[in-house]
Image: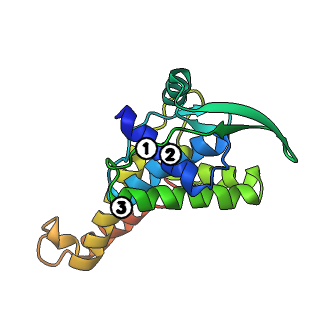
């Protein structure tokens, strides 16, 4: 993980949130940035390591290191939902290391977090916990983002099988349509949506 790039991403999230973001929302925006990047670009923006913390995915080490370094400060503010920790004036950091595609993903992640949070913490949590890595995550352990890629690859294989026919991958003997159909049926059972990847 590039520390300077992380600083740039945090500054962008802060900017897209109009300077009003809690540390909880920041952690979720960083998670969604990585998740959406894996989902749409098949690569991470930062390569952050997230742990399944008390309240979901949290890049504990990275954020604690930045706060100790003085990159951003937090302050406690009383809101109608209770005490929230807000980011306080993070330094402006050049975002040259962030390409246009990454910028769009960061914007989308921040927008989702702010919109879901406006409807309540449960709404945001439900969305976060519905993502592929969180479905198979274990509390207290590192969250494996590669589950997103695995699911995408399986979808591509299924699509190719349906478009080109199974014979594109496996050669069946003449007159074995029944065997081919049975294999396709078993493949569908294997790759059902509710199976963890």
- Count neighbours of disc 2 (C-alpha within 10 A) and say few if under 14, some if 14 to 19, many if 20 or more: many
SS for callout 1: helix
Extreme residue in the right direction: 80
> In front here: 103 or 184?
103
SS for callout 3: helix
Mark 3 or mark 1: whose residue is earlier in sequence: 1
- Count neighbours of disc 3 (C-alpha within 10 A) and say few if under 14, some if 14 to 19, many if 20 or more: few
Q: Is residue 191 visible?
A: no
Q: Position of residue 127 (x, y in %)?
A: 63, 56
Name the residue that disc number 3 marks. 101
Mark 2 or mark 3: whose residue is earlier in sequence: 2
**Residue 36, above or below 139:** below
Q: Which is in the foreground here, disc 2 or disc 3?
A: 2
> In front here: 156 or 27?
27
Mark 3 to mark 1: distance in Å?
A: 15 Å
SS for callout 2: helix
Question: Pointer 2 and pointer 1: residues touching (CB < 8 Å)?
Answer: yes
Query: For this view, does 70 lie left or right of residue 18?
Result: left
Q: Residue at x 59, y 45 (%)?
A: 28
In the rendered picture of this protein, how many numbered marks are placed on residues?
3
Badge number at residue 11? 2
Mark 2 to mark 1: distance in Å?
A: 5 Å
Name the residue that disc number 1 marks. 8
């Amino acid at each position: 993980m590039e520390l300077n790039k992380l600083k740039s991403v945090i500054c962008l999230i802060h900017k897209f949130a109009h300077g009003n973001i809690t540390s909880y929302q920041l952690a979720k925006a960083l998670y969604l940035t990585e998740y959406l990047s894996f989902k749409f670009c098949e690569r991470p923006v930062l390569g952050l390591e997230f742990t399944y913390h008390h309240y979901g995915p949290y890049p504990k080490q990275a954020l604690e290191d930045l706060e100790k370094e003085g990159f951003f400060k937090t302050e406690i503010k009383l809101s109608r939902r209770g005490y929230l920790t807000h980011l306080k004036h993070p330094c402006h950091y050049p975002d040259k290391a962030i390409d246009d595609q990454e910028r769009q993903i960061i914007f989308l992640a921040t927008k989702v977090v702010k919109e879901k949070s406006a409807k309540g913490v449960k709404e945001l949590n439900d969305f976060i916990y519905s993502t592929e890595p969180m479905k198979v995550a274990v509390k207290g352990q590192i969250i494996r983002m590669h589950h997103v890629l695995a699911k995408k690859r399986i979808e591509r294989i299924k699509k190719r099988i349906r478009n080109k026919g199974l014979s594109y991958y496996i050669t069946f003997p003449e007159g074995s349509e029944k065997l081919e159909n049975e294999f396709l049926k078993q493949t569908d059972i294997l790759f059902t949506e509710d199976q963890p990847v």
